[in-house]
Amino acid sequence: MLSHFDWDEHLWAAIGPGSKSGLEKMLGSTVRGNEEEAMKYLHGSLHSHFTRLGITDDNVPRKCDERPSGLSMVDIEHSVCEYDKYCRARFPQLKGKRTEIKKRFTPKALDNKPYTADLPDKWRKPPTAHKVPKPPAVRKSENGEEVYEVSHIVAEREKADKNTVARSSTKRFLVRWKGWGPEDDWWMSEDDLRDAQDILRTWNAIKYGIQEGMEKVRNDPYSKTPSRLTSTQSRRRSSKF
C-alpha cells in the first residue's frame, strides 16, 4: 500500500474488463452499461446474503480489527474478476473475447521505497456511524401489539414440529421489515404472514424460478441462461405452493 493515497475504497473501485465479463456471466447481458450500479448492489446486499446462508458475523472477512466485517467495493471487484478467470479456466470450450489468463504482476519499488501490506491510516478508521430513525408502527393490533410493514422475505427454512407424533416440518421465513436493517430480521411462520400474501407469492415465484433454472442447467449445462418466468407462470406456480 502507498501511504500517500487517501481515497475512499468504496468510491474509487475501477471496474476492469475481467469484472465486467464476470458480472455479465452472473447477471446476463442486460448489465452492460450498468456495471457500477450492479457492483454497488452486490456491495449493499452482502450482509443479507450472509444471513440467508447462515454465515455469522465472526466468519465474515474484515480488512483489519478496527473495521467492521464485510467486503469493500474493491474486494468485490477483485472477486468478480477472479470468478470470470476461473470460469474461463474451468470451461475453456466456452469462447469469449477474453481468453488470456497468464498475466503476472511483479511489484517494483517506487522512489526506492518498497510496497508494503500496511493499510493507509484512513482505511483503518471505521466509517462514521449515522443514526437513522426507525419507521414507526403502521398500526396496533386488537391486543395492542405494534404492527409493522413487511418489505420482503430474505430466506426460508424448515423447522421440525416437536409437538406432533409425526414430527412434521413447518416452514419459517426470514422477514425484512420496511425501513429496518438485516439486524432486525425475524423468523416467522406462514400463518404469521397471512396479511402479507403478496410478499409470499413474490417469494414463491422467485424460488420456483431459481429451481427451474437450476434444473435446466443440470439437464443441459451448456445451454443459454433460461429466461425469466412470465407473471402468469409465476402466479400459477406460486398458487401450488
Image: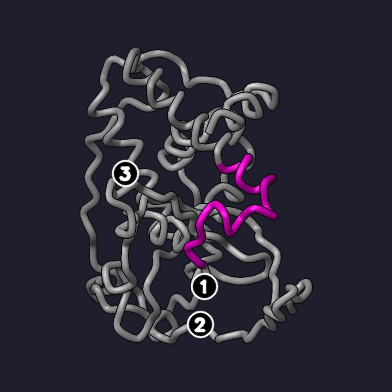
Region of the chain picked out in magenta, as a range: 186-203
Q: CA distance from mark 2 to mark 3?
A: 27 Å
Residue shown at the point (32%, 62%) measured from the top left: 55
First-in-chain label (2 vs 3): 3
Q: Please give the residue where the numbered disc 1 appears in the rendered image.
A: 8
Q: Is residue 152 above or below residue 217?
A: below
Q: CA distance from mark 2 to mark 1?
A: 10 Å
Viewer-nearest residue: 45 or 53: 53
Residue 217 occupies quadrant: top left
Left-right relation of 195 to 82: right
Question: At label 3, which amino acid type do we have?
Answer: Glu
Left-right relation of 114 to 3: left
Q: Please give the residue where the numbered disc 2 appears in the rendered image.
A: 127
Residue 103 occupies quadrant: top left
Left-right relation of 60 to 230: left
Disc assigned to residue 82: 3
Question: At label 1, which amino acid type do we have?
Answer: Asp
